[in-house]
Amino acid sequence: MSAIATNSPQKGVNYLKMANLNTVPKQLKQPIGDMMAEMSNLMFKLSDGKISVDKWRELMARLITKNHLATAMIGLNDLEIPEELLNAIRLSIEDQLVYLDIFANDLRMRPDYFPVWRAEMYALSPLTSYDEAKVFKRYGRMIPFPAMPKQGTQCHTNCGCKWRVVEIDKEKGDFNCFWERHKDDSCQTCLQREEDWYPIEVRDWMLQL
Ligand SMILES: [Zn+2]
């Protein structure tokens, strides 16, 4: 109870501190913001005892899945998601569900722990699917990046890094792709990727190692 009373007036502060909306593209600020609100709402319901952790996990998983698909449709500017892109999106969703299970476990272990900020960070995860959809829209297929920004980075969904794609011969599927580190990103993963993946070479649609 008291957790809500003390936390709710600072909800906006939590947002800005933890889940960084600065790197969210303009057309996604509304849906991502809505998703954040829904996710904090679920955390309040949990702390109120209105839903169980299992139920919370199920509703969070549904929100994550729905929003990955929705942002991909926005990035694609199409309601039909091609199979190849869908497979990539599935992997991103599965990734998030693994983190969500760990989160659910933490909640079970600590009955007084209701971190709204941690729940809200999941709202940024669909940006990965949006980025992948953008690539697909541009090239008609997926570039085999070794990982996307926000995937497996220590800064999690706050990662603001980007792939910069230099087309060598896009018909042949030849690209040099540079992991551009966001100026505020200095977690170990992003620094390492900048070092290792600057650039990666893709030839004939295959990642060269
Ligand atoms: Zn990053």
Image (spheres, grey):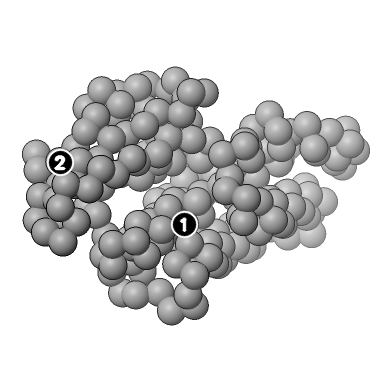
Which residue is depicted at the point 9% across and 39% down? 209
In the rendered structure, the answer to whether residue 175 lies left or right of residue 35 reads left
What amino acid is at disc 2? Glu
**Position of residue 37 measured from the top left corner of the image (x, y, whole percent):** 74, 52
Name the foreground residue: 143 vs 54: 143
User: Closer to us: mark 2 or mark 1?
Assistant: 2
Task: Tell me if the residue at label 1 has its CB under 8 Å from ligand 1.
Answer: no
Between the residue at mark 2 and the residue at mark 1, the CA separation in whole angstroms equals 22 Å
What amino acid is at disc 1? Tyr
Q: Does 149 sit above or below residue 68?
A: above
Q: Does 32 sit above or below residue 184?
A: below
Name the foreground residue: 31 vs 13: 31
**Lower sequence index among marks 2 and 1:** 1
Is residue 65 visible to us here? no
Which residue is depicted at the point 78% across and 32% down? 13
Q: Secondary structure at mark 2?
A: strand
**Position of residue 109 measured from the top left corner of the image (x, y, whole percent):** 59, 39
**Position of residue 72 measured from the top left corner of the image (x, y, whole percent):** 47, 64
Is residue 82 visible to us here? yes
- Residue receiving disc 2: 201
- Residue receiving disc 1: 130
Which residue is depicted at the point 33% across and 40% down? 164
